[in-house]
Image (cartoon, grey):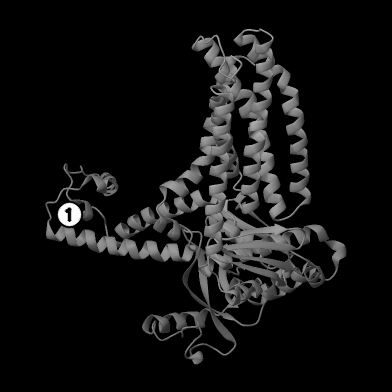
């Protein structure tokens, strides 16, 4: 490889690594602690915070405008200036310059429009920080504290609930059931206001959950044991209209703190009130109102075989189509034929996800639902595709780790890395003099590349991972020692600087590759066959092996060549007796 190619490769690798490392730097360095705490909270809390702050900011801006109508917008209010100019453009009017705060606020058609603008700014900023966290290096529970839970899904019960398995693919059914269980747990944990969770499938029928920070064991168990099954209910239109009229006059006395009707007599005894929800800008279910539906289930979700999003032939608008099995098609055909002109609600996890009018009897087992946008259609498809599965979950094990232990482990791990790195650097500088600088630079870049790769793959740093890094630091210097000793041998034979460096690297190449390849193979097997702490150690070791080879053979070689060709050095500072 030519020197120019080597330089281009190094610059490209460092640039890519910086892009990988940017989310971690943004999260751990650029994001204040209070913003981190807010970003790690649930979407429900983020929504409440953004709404409250937006309402407060609107009151502050209105008060400031009324107090001093001639105050010109400040530089920190450029966001308001841009929005006001856009409003004037839409009104086909020329925006005044300079823009006063009073004029800018007057450009909004109503107070809610201004509130929505400010809330959007808060939401985007917080969710951006949340994305930084998701794409950054995570601290394991042994460093950050918290709780880990292993949940077992009873997939045999899922298969048994289907009945005749001769007409279905059992493996696909189990895969869909596990995917639904993971998604449901993630949604419930976030909804209950717990910290940013790590939820992943482990093996065929287990789910591993990490919850950083404090969490109540009983609360976690109640979330995990809950179930949500999809079904279809008939909407009682007359009772819904009567209830909504009642609710408008008695909003503060219709439901108790648990969400139950205080006066059940306001609806028929065979009905119940359920909230109607859509997905908002936060990705949360947002209640749009209430519908009164029959308690009797018209059709259970287990009869759904598939669901997909398509388009109407004439209008091209999105529609969700789903297919029913033979039994479900017969039940649905009879039911819709008897209730033409009425409304049908799709209920999932005690929330109404869709409400459609029955225009005609639907026979044949193929159903199409229309009347919403593309995103709503995708959300409904997901509900129909997976939410019907009833997956029994049980907590197999729980482990709580105190935050004080995590703080102590972080300090000890960081101290071990620093001491190990500094000690090796001092040794290399003393023993190999000027050439030791190359080794020190290679060591620093080695850690830089390691952390970048950890960040790129959203890997978790644990105590065993730190142990792997410390071992890598010691192993990385071995490659430099082999190269330096080879160069010294060539200098003793009387070769010049350029020849000694070239021959030294060539002779050391396969010795370095052989040792690191065997170590990488061992790390690869440990990462695949091991679990838990063994995997963390193996992954960091494997990453370290790759970065070690790159820094020793590419970065260090370029630094030697720079001294030879650019600085025109004739001798090599590589030891006490060899030059």
Quarter where residue 507 is shown: top right
Tell which of 406 and 156 is nearer to you: 406
Q: Is residue 361 visible?
A: no
Residue drawn at x 28%, y 64% as measured from the top left: 56
Most extreme residue toward the right is 166
Local secondary structure at mark 1: helix
Quarter where residue 435 is shown: top right
The location of residue 365, given as percent across then percent down, is 73, 64
The location of residue 464, given as percent across then percent down, is 65, 51
Residue drawn at x 56%, y 38% as measured from the top left: 423
Q: Is residue 196 visible?
A: yes
Residue 78, relative to residue 353: is it above or below? Answer: above
Residue, disc 1: 102
Residue 28, relative to residue 518: is it above or below? Answer: below
Quarter where residue 480 is shown: top right
Tell which of 521 and 381 is nearer to you: 521
The location of residue 485, given as percent across then percent down, is 67, 21
On-image quarter of the N terminus: top right
Q: Is residue 275 left or right of residue 163?
A: left
On-image quarter of the C terminus: top right
The location of residue 335, given as percent across then percent down, is 68, 75
Q: How crowded is mark 1: few (under 14 residues within 10 Å), some or many (20 or more)?
A: many
Q: Is residue 150 left or right of residue 156?
A: left
């Amino acid at each position: 490889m030519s020197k120019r190619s080597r330089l281009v490769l190094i610059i490209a690798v460092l640039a890519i690594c910086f892009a990988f490392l940017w989310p971690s730097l943004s999260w751990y360095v650029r994001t204040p602690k209070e913003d981190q705490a807010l970003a790690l909270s649930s979407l429900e809390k983020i929504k409440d915070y953004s709404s409250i702050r937006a309402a407060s900011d609107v009151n502050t801006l209105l008060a400031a405008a009324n107090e001093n109508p001639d105050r010109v917008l400040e530089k920190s209010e450029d966001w308001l200036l841009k929005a006001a100019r856009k409003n004037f453009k839409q009104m086909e009017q020329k925006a005044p310059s300079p823009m006063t705060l009073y004029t800018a606020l007057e450009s909004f058609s109503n107070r809610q429009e201004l509130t929505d603008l400010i809330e959007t700014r808060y939401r985007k900023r917080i969710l951006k920080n949340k994305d930084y966290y998701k794409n950054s290096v995570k601290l394991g529970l042994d460093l950050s504290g918290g709780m880990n839970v292993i949940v077992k899904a009873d997939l045999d019960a899922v298969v048994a609930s289907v009945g005749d398995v001769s007409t279905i693919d059992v493996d696909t059914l189990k895969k869909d059931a596990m995917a639904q269980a993971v998604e449901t747990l993630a949604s419930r944990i976030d909804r209950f206001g717990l910290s940013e969770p790590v939820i992943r499938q482990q093996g065929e029928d287990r789910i591993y959950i990490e919850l950083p920070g404090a969490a109540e064991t009983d609360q976690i168990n109640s979330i995990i044991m809950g179930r949500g099954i999809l079904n279809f209910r008939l909407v009682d239109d007359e009772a819904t209209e009567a209830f909504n009229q009642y609710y408008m006059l008695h909003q503060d006395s219709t439901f108790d703190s648990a969400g139950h009707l205080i006066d059940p007599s306001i609806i028929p005894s065979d009905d119940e009130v359920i909230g109607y929800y859509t997905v908002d800008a936060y990705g949360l279910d947002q209640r749009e109102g209430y519908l009164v539906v029959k308690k009797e289930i018209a059709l259970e979700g287990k009869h759904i075989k598939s669901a997909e999003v398509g388009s109407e032939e004439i209008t091209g608008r999105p529609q969700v189509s789903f297919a029913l099995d033979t039994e479900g098609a017969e039940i649905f055909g009879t039911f819709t034929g008897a209730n033409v002109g009425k409304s049908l609600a799709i209920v999932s996890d005690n929330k109404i996800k869709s409400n459609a009018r029955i225009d005609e009897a639907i026979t044949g087992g193929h159903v199409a639902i229309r009347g919403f946008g593309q995103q709503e259609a995708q959300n409904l498809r997901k509900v129909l595709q997976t939410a019907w599965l009833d997956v029994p979950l049980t907590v197999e094990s729980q482990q709580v780790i105190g935050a004080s232990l995590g703080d102590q482990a972080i300090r000890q791990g960081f101290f071990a890395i620093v001491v190990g790195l500094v000690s090796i650097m001092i040794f290399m500088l003393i023993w190999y003099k000027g050439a030791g600088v190359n080794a020190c630079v290679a060591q620093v870049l080695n850690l830089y590349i390691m952390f970048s790769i950890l960040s790129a793959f959203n890997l978790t740093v644990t105590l065993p991972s730190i142990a792997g890094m410390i071992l890598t630091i010691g192993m990385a210097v071995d490659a430099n020692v082999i190269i330096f000793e080879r160069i010294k041998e060539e200098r003793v034979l009387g070769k010049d600087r350029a020849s000694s460096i070239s021959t030294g690297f060539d002779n050391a190449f396969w010795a370095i590759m052989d040792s690191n390849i065997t170590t990488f193979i061992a790390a690869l097997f440990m990462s695949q066959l091991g679990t838990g702490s063994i995997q963390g150690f193996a992954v960091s070791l494997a990453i370290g092996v790759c970065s070690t080879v790159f820094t020793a053979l590419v970065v260090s070689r370029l630094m030697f060549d720079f001294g030879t060709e650019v600085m025109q050095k004739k001798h090599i500072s590589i030891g006490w007796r060899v030059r």
